[in-house]
Image (cartoon, rainbow, N blue to C red):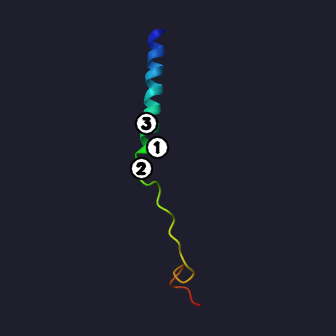
Amino acid sequence: MTLLLLEALAAGLLLVGIVWWTMFSGRRGGELPPEKKDADSADPNSEK
C-alpha cells in the first residue's frame, strides 16, 4: 500500500514539474504583441 502511495506521489510531482516547466520556459517578456495591420497593407493584390 505504501508503495502505491509513493508511486502516486511521484507521478503527481512529475506532472506538476512538467506543467511548471512548460509554463515558465517560454519567452522572458511573455508573448509578442500582435502585429498591427493598416488598411493599405492588408492585401497588396486587392484593387481599390
Neighbor class of circle 1 (other Cα within 10 Å; few <14, some 14-19, many 20+) is: few
Measured in 3D between alpha carbons, the distance from the residue under mark 2 to the one under mark 3, in whole angstroms, is 13 Å
Q: Secondary structure at mark 2?
A: loop
| Marks 2 and 1 close (CB-CB < 8 Å) | yes
Q: Is residue 20 above or below residue 27?
A: above
Mark closer to the chain start, 2 or 3: 3
Write the residue at 41% across / 40% down. 21
Instruction: Report x, y in % for residue 16.
Output: 47, 32
Mark in the foreground, 2 or 3: 2
Give the residue type at disc 2.
Answer: Gly
| Residue for badge 3 | 18
**Residue lying at the far bottom of the rendered structure:** 48
**Residue lying at the far front of the rendered structure:** 29
Give the residue type at disc 3.
Answer: Ile
Measured in 3D between alpha carbons, the distance from the residue under mark 2 to the one under mark 1, in whole angstroms, is 7 Å
| Residue for badge 2 | 26
Please identify the quarter of the rendering in which residue 40 is found.
Answer: bottom right
Write the residue at 41% across / 49% down. 26
| Marks 3 and 1 close (CB-CB < 8 Å) | no
Neighbor class of circle 3 (other Cα within 10 Å; few <14, some 14-19, many 20+) is: few
Mark closer to the chain start, 3 or 1: 3
Q: Secondary structure at mark 1?
A: helix
Mark in the foreground, 3 or 1: 1
What numbered label is drawn on residue 13? Answer: none
Q: Secondary structure at mark 3?
A: helix
Neighbor class of circle 2 (other Cα within 10 Å; few <14, some 14-19, many 20+) is: few
Give the residue type at disc 1.
Answer: Met
Measured in 3D between alpha carbons, the distance from the residue under mark 3 to the one under mark 1, in whole angstroms, is 9 Å
Instruction: Report x, y in % for residue 46.
Output: 55, 85
| Residue for badge 1 | 23
Write the residue at 43% across / 55% down. 29
Instruction: Report x, y in % for residue 33.
Output: 50, 63
